[in-house]
Image (cartoon, grey):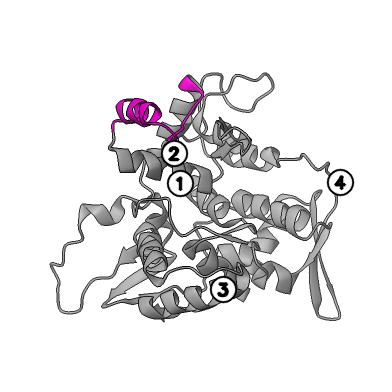
């Protein structure tokens, strides 16, 4: 894996940023920050400062909304970026013409989807991907997390990364995800508006307990829609396992698995699997042979399959 503990300019992901980048890229065909002219144009179009332009590009790429072609550094919208943030122009779509699926991330399923896309990556290591894919800690100190990442990055990436760089990345990661807990004895404790700036806080995956302490329990995730879980399951089985089957333990604990990324408890994964099999009986089958639970995909797909039909079920059903 390649380490990438910078690029966000310490700005957490904010509401509206992904839509702004998708819209700008759709209109101008470029989100480059390689020249002063490009940056100035982006500042005007996005209505933010120079550092925020870089942050918007960073998060758009990290969330798989935008991809940059390495040979010429030009950008283009991904299929999922176009699907979420731009109006449909294709015939045969399940949504009304001229209507984007969820450009402002108003549905909780869209936020779960963004969380999955942000962390479904085996190639680039960040603080959040380390936490959601490589740890099982349910309570932790920020200082210990920084220490662990610095130590493990040397092995995972075969490169040394400065502690100060990792600290900034961890701070940004926690501001992107962590909700504030009510301080004991402070009935009128007020949480600042800035703590709700990131949509990912709504997922409740990490709680800031104060004084550098955090919690992140493994849970059932009742707000995680079956369709979004099923989308993540299919991506994991075909892209990571390169198979048509996956064992329960792999779905729970492997890197990039839905169990890991969504921080599901064992019971939570079981509930999600049961719901997925019930909703898609012609697509998914769960077996239990001598205590070995497995899920099998009953259909074959080509390597270019995006599993958009699963997302269609969610967005068509929630309107």
Q: CA distance from mark 3 to mark 2?
A: 32 Å
For marks 4 and 1, the one nearer the N-term is 1
Q: Is residue 314 visible?
A: yes
Q: CA distance from mark 3 to mark 4?
A: 39 Å
Magenta residue span: 28-47
The residue to which callout 4 is attached is: 300
Identify whether 209 is placed above or below 30.
below
Q: Quadrant of the N terminus?
A: bottom right
For marks 3 and 4, the one nearer the N-term is 3
Camera-side mark, 4 or 1 = 1
The residue to which callout 1 is attached is: 59
Q: Position of residue 276 (x, y in %)?
A: 69, 56
The residue to which callout 2 is attached is: 18
Residue 7 counted in the magenta span:
no
What residue is rendered at 54% in x and 62% in y?
129
* Disc sitting over residue 98 in the figure: none
The residue to which callout 3 is attached is: 154
- Mark 2 and mark 1 in contact? Answer it, CB < 8 Å: yes
What residue is rendered at 54% in x and 49% in y?
113
């Amino acid at each position: 894996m390649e380490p990438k503990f910078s690029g966000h300019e310490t700005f957490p992901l904010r509401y509206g940023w992904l839509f702004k980048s998708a819209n700008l890229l759709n209109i101008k065909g470029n989100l480059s920050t390689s020249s002063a002219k490009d940056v100035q144009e982006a500042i005007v179009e996005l209505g933010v400062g120079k550092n925020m332009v870089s942050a918007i590009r960073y998060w758009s790429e990290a969330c798989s909304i935008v991809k940059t072609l390495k040979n010429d550094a030009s950008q283009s919208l991904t299929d999922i970026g176009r699907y979420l943030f731009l109006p449909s122009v294709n015939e045969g779509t399940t949504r009304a013409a001229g209507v984007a699926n969820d450009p402002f991330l108003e549905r909780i399923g869209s936020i779960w989807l963004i969380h999955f896309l942000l962390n479904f990556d085996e190639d680039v290591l960040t603080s959040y991907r380390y936490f959601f894919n490589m740890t099982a800690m349910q309570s932790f100190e920020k200082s210990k997390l920084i220490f662990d990442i610095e130590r493990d990055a040397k092995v995972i990436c075969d490169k040394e990364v400065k502690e100060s760089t990792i600290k900034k990345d961890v701070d940004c990661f926690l501001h992107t995800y962590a909700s504030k807990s009510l301080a004991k004895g402070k009935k009128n404790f007020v949480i600042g508006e800035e703590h709700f700036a990131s949509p990912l806080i709504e997922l409740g995956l990490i709680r800031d307990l104060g004084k550098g302490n955090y919690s992140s329990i493994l849970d059932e995730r009742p707000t995680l829609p079956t369709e979004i879980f099923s989308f993540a399951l299919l991506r994991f089985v075909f892209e990571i396992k390169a198979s048509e089957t996956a064992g329960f333990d792999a779905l729970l604990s492997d890197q990039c698995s839905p169990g890991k990324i969504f921080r599901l408890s064992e019971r939570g994964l079981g509930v999600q699997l049961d719901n997925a099999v019930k909703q898609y009986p012609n697509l998914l089958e769960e077996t239990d042979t001598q205590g070995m639970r497995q899920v099998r995909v009953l259909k074959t797909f080509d390597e270019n399959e995006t599993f958009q039909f699963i997302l269609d079920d969610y967005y068509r059903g929630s309107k």
